[in-house]
Amino acid sequence: MSALTDPQPRATSRIWGKLSRNKSALVGATVVIVFIALALLAPVLPIADPTGTDWGAIRKPPSVAAWMGTDELGRDVLARMIWGARASLLAGVVSVLIAVAIGVPFGLIAGYFGGWTDSIISRVTEALLAMPFLIMAIALAAFLGPSLTNAMIAIGLSAVPIFIRLTRGQVLSVKTEDYVEGARAIGLGHVPIMTRYILPNVFPPILVQATLTIATAIIAEAALSFLGLGQQPPAPSWGSMLNTAKNFLSQAPWMAIWPGAGIFLVVMGFNLLGDGLRDALDPREH
């Protein structure tokens, strides 16, 4: 089938056109891309050692030598910000991948089969949703032990109920469509129907939710690091940098300003991008 008659390129072109016309989404995507680029290029950028101390440069204000100043141990704040971005973005992406990998299959099964299967999964999901997301993440991280890996697992497990509920709701509205009934009529099994006909059609809202949840996961990782349950010193993390900076707000306010601004910008970027994707992937929008 040629590109002129294939609906897939036309759909992709339509989505990209709507996304490119959304200025706030472009701003969000730009912010996200900049932070991802900095995080990926951190090992090769000409910056100082993020864990290297300099007792002669303790709490120095921003200057030519240290563009964002230094912290309580004389470490370069700019270097720690860039390397801290790696921890925050890694935590956000990996946590959401864990949540999607667990939540989407359960939501798919619950919505497709219904009956007692749906009842059991839905009741467990509702019980988990009754607990605030961050409280559950803190409890799980405290149980697993303080480390970035355990923090990512805790955040991912805490976000699972969100994706179960979303996927289930989408499947309930899709499984009665004519193309699904047609697949059943020609004798396809449950797994092919779910993977080939239902999942691709419920994927757009899952993608939007995943983008928005990355922002939530980044905030959660910063909170866990602030409490000492995430990235462990001396490895840099925006949350742990804020935890240290709270003791020097009057003497060295830049220690708190930069990590706070980093969290704000990257979370704003993912939220704007997620909102833009929601509008672009909505077939009702023209």
Image: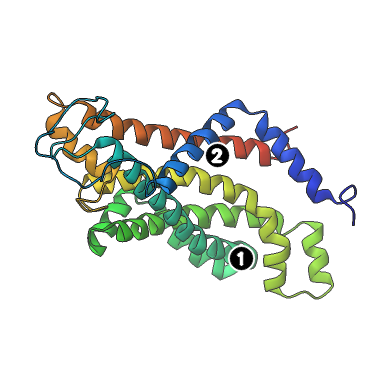
x%, y% of residue 194?
68, 66
Q: Residues within 10 Å of mark 2 (few under 14, many from 20)?
A: many
Is disc 2 in contact with disc 1, using a CB cutoff of under 8 Å?
Answer: no
Q: Which residue is mark 2?
A: 274
User: SS class of the residue under badge 1?
Assistant: loop
Question: What residue do we see at 32% from left, 53% from top?
Answer: 137
Question: What residue do we see at 77% from left, 44% from top?
Answer: 11
User: Front-most of 212 and 26?
Assistant: 26
- Label located before the other in sequence (2 or 1): 1
- What colour scheme governs how the chains and residues are painted in the rendered image of this protein? rainbow
Q: Quadrant of residue 279?
A: top right
Question: What residue do we see at 59% from left, 68% from top?
Answer: 115
Task: Let me know if residue 25 appears in the view.
Answer: yes
x%, y% of residue 183?
80, 67
Q: CA distance from mark 2 to mark 1?
A: 30 Å
State which quarter of the image contains the C terminus. top right
x%, y% of residue 126?
44, 55
Q: Is residue 54 above or below residue 170?
A: above
Question: What residue do we see at 40% from left, 52% from top?
Answer: 90
Q: Which residue is mark 1?
A: 114
x%, y% of residue 213?
46, 46
**Image position of 50 (left or right of 5):** left
Going by the numbered disc 1, the residue's amino acid type is Gly
User: Front-most of 272 and 201?
Assistant: 272
